[in-house]
Amino acid sequence: RKLNEYPFLMMSANNKTRLRAFLLDLDVFSSFFSSNSLRADLLRYWLFVIEADRSKSSTTSSKKKMTSSEEIHEMIVKPYLSTLESQEPKTDPTTLTTHLRCLADFFEELAQFKPAHHLRKRLLDLANRHPTNQKTTTHALLSLARVHDHRGEFAQALPLCEQAVILNSARASLALCKSLNQLAHLHKKLANYQAARELYHSLLDHLQNIS
């Protein structure tokens, strides 16, 4: 229902404040980010905001010039984190999981790895507090491991992938295969080639079992 308002906000140039508030709503944000077509609109909007601020600040010489990363953090990351803090107490665990996952993925796309890492940890904490959803816990573990991987922290990523493998080891599944693949990939990066080879062989066996 909230998305029905979007076309009217886009048509009016006088609705910039309302459009910003609309896109900062986490239900709206998650819907936009989960849609291939609307995700492009989301990115276009925030790039427009940054460019508009640059034009405004170029006329104010006293304002300290920020790097692109600092601009993204100030204008996109901080408002979303602030919205998350205000909405979290009223949000159920399933919806909160969606918001955390979408925000973490969005921040990663913007190369904001530190806040993405923070959200991945919160996602894992949430999954551990509500352990009924094995898929969510696996996703949280592998996502956090991926953040460590991006940062070159392979040793920190390794136990997270191992935990995901153990969690899904009861039967052959796509979740187990993803966990094995990511764990093997990390061992290869750490030059543990024998361990990587054994994991890839195990992965092939499990893929045959579920095909």
Image (cartoon, rainbow, N blue to C red):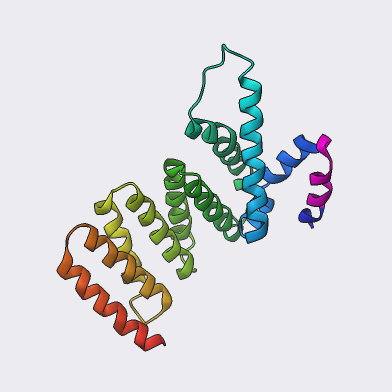
In the rendered structure, the answer to whether residue 40 lies left or right of residue 64 reads right
Foreground pick, 119 / 108: 108
Q: Quadrant of residue 51?
A: top right
Looking at the image, which residue is at 62% across and 20% down?
A: 57
- 162, above or below 73, in the image: below
Q: Residue at 77% x, 54% y: name it.
A: 2
**Quadrant of residue 134 in the image?**
bottom left
Instruction: Give the residues in magenta.
Output: 5-14
Q: Quadrant of the C terminus?
A: bottom left
Q: Is residue 13 magenta?
A: yes
Instruction: From the viewer's side, name the closer residue of 209 and 124.
Output: 209
**Which image quarter holds the N terminus?**
bottom right
Q: Is residue 11 magenta?
A: yes
Residue visible at 29% across and 48% down in the picture: 152
Q: Is residue 23 visible?
A: yes
Dominant secondary structure (helix, strand or loop) of the stretch shown in magenta: helix
The relative height of residue 12 versus residue 185 in the rendered view (above or below) is above
Image point (45%, 63%), residue name: 139
Above or below 14: residue 174: below
**Residue 158 screen position, x and y as percent:** 27, 58
Name which quarter of the figure residue 180 lies in. Answer: bottom left
Q: Is residue 184 above or below residue 82?
A: below
**83 lies left or right of 158:** right
In terms of depth relative to the viewer, which is nearer, 128 or 35?
35
Task: Indicate the position of residue 183 as horizontal and vertical percent values.
Answer: 29, 65
Where is residue 148 shown, x and y percent of the image? 34, 50
